Image (cartoon, rainbow, N blue to C red):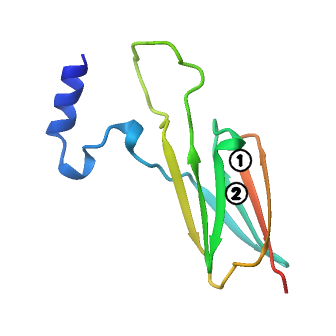
Amino acid sequence: MAHSIDRYFRLMPAGRRQRPAERRWAPAADVYQTADGWLVKVDLAGVSPEEIEITVAGPVLFIEGTRRDAFCSETVAYHQIEITYSRFEKTLRFPQVIEGATIESDYRDGLLIVRLRSSK
């Protein structure tokens, strides 16, 4: 079976030759402007909070980490796989510099909630 999977990836166009576990995925996000800054919600179902990194540079918020499949640790033969288990990154650009803002984050029900409160 591994031979046929390798053949499949060789037949794909060059830009898509990475195995699914090697590709980075971008989670969906909602961004809201509030009276004192910004509120960001990121859909990270199945990601452990310890796997999430949040950084800010100028007007850009970077959220990255890894979603791991903790339920299938033994060797299994899969029937259908639609959920991506690998590194992810989300880059959000704001209309002004957010560096220096107070960052508060919470993770519940599969959503990462990030509040960026202006220091002004």
The image shows residue 119 at horizontal and vertical percentages of: 84, 81
Amino acid type, mark 2: Lys
Residue 70: name its quadrant: top right
Residue at point 47%, 49% (across, down):
25
Q: Which residue is mark 2?
A: 41
Amino acid type, mark 1: Leu
Q: Which type of secondary structure does the marked residue at label 1 adopt?
A: strand
Residue 78: name its quadrant: top left
**Image quadrant where one finds the C terminus:** bottom right
The image shows residue 1 at horizontal and vertical percentages of: 24, 16
Q: Is residue 43 left or right of residue 37?
A: left
Q: Are marks 2 and 1 in contact (CB under 8 Å)?
A: yes
Residue 91's place in the image compared with 66, above or below, is below
Q: Is residue 84 left or right of residue 95?
A: left
Q: Which type of secondary structure does the marked residue at label 2 adopt?
A: strand
Q: Would you call the spot at circle 1 few (<14 residues within 10 Å), some (14-19), or many (20 or more)?
A: some
Along the line of sight, which residue is nearer the eye, 8 or 73?
A: 73
Q: Which residue is mark 1?
A: 111
Residue at point 52%, 49% (across, down):
88
Residue 112's place in the image compared with 79, above or below, is below
Residue at point 43%, 27% (across, down):
81
